Each structure stands twice: as C-alpha cells, then as structure tokens.
C-alpha cells in the first residue's frame, strides 16, 4: 500500500509538470506565430505587440541600437516601407539553456533577402522580443 501511495504521488507530480510544460510550449508557439505573421505582412504595429519594453535592433549591417518599444515600432515601419515583404519563413527555432526563445528566418523583400535572428525572453509569462538582427544576404 505504501508503494502505491508513492507511485500515485509521483504520477500526480509528473502530470502537473506535463501540464505546465504544455502551457509553456503553447505560449512559445503563439509568440513566434504572431511574430511570423507580422513579418510576412510587414506590419510594424502587429510586430510591436511582441516587443519588450526595450528592443535591440540591427538593420542593414549597422551597429545594434537599443530602442524603446515605441521607437522600435517606427524603426521597423521605416524598414518595412523601404523593404516591402514578399515572404518570411522560419528556418530554425529553439530554446536556449537559459529559457530564451530564438528563431532564425529568411525575410524576402522586393530585390533583397535578409537572414533574421529573433531572440525572445519570458516576461510575466509572455515571450517578448528583446532583439532582432537583419543580415543582408
């Protein structure tokens, strides 16, 4: 009987851990899904909904610059205006050992193509972009 109680407790703990892990995976998927959609349409407004309070952007080979989320929205609006999207696809994504989400994608614009590195951190249970690097191919 004692072993049965231990097994039941272990099983219960395992189920709780699985539930929270599934919730985290769904949050990660939702976060990257909304970013992917905003990038495909070139919507700085939609993309900015996934920005943390400060965002580091690297565009067109320039140095990385930190912006408030409002400033970053305007910077991305200008980038999308100059580089209208044709497509965006995620080639690889994952989670670092520190819990950050990352994605490596390809942003196709009219006449140009960029490799994009997106890094997201969890804040209050929601993954938000803290840096984006656009590297011209």
Image (cartoon, rainbow, N blue to C red):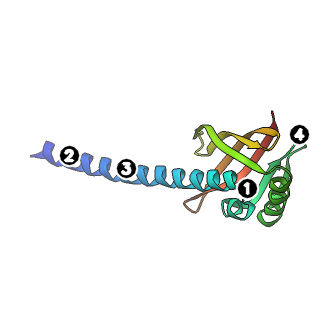
Q: Verify CB contact (< 8 Å) between mark 2 and mark 3.
A: no
Q: Verify CB contact (< 8 Å) between mark 1 and mark 4.
A: no
Which residue bears the numbered disc 4? 61
Q: Can the viewer see residue 6 in this picture?
A: yes
Residue 132 position, x and y percent, is: 75, 47
Label placed on residue 63:
none
Residue 54 position, x and y percent, is: 77, 59
Which residue bears the numbered disc 2? 6
Count neighbours of disc 3 (C-alpha within 10 A) and say few if under 14, some if 14 to 19, many if 20 or more: few
Instruction: Label 2: state its secondary structure.
Output: helix
Which residue bears the numbered disc 3? 17
Instruction: Label 3: state its secondary structure.
Output: helix
Q: Verify CB contact (< 8 Å) between mark 2 and mark 4.
A: no
Q: CA distance from mark 3 to mark 1?
A: 38 Å
Q: Quadrant of residue 105?
A: top right
Q: Earlier in the sequence, mark 2 or mark 4?
A: 2
Among all residues in the image, which is located at the extreme top?
A: 137
Q: Please tell me which residue is depicted at 80% across the width and 54% down the height of the picture.
A: 80
Which residue bears the numbered disc 1? 42
Q: Nearer the viewer, mark 3 or mark 1?
A: 1
Count neighbours of disc 4 (C-alpha within 10 A) and say few if under 14, some if 14 to 19, many if 20 or more: few
Q: Please tell me which residue is depicted at 66% across the width and 59% down the height of the picture.
A: 50
């Amino acid at each position: 009987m004692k072993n049965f109680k231990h097994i039941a407790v272990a099983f219960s703990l395992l189920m709780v851990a699985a539930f929270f892990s599934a919730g985290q995976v769904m949050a990660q998927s939702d976060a990257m899904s909304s970013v992917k959609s905003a990038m495909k349409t070139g919507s700085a407004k939609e993309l900015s909904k996934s920005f943390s309070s400060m965002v580091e952007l690297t565009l067109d080979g320039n140095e990385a610059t930190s912006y408030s989320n409002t400033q970053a929205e305007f910077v991305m609006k200008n980038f999308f205006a100059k580089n209208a999207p044709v497509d965006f696809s995620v080639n690889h994504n994952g989670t670092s050992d520190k819990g950050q989400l990352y994605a490596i994608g390809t942003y196709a614009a009219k006449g140009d193509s960029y490799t994009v590195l997106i890094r997201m951190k969890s804040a209050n249970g929601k993954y938000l972009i803290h840096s984006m690097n656009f590297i011209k191919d």
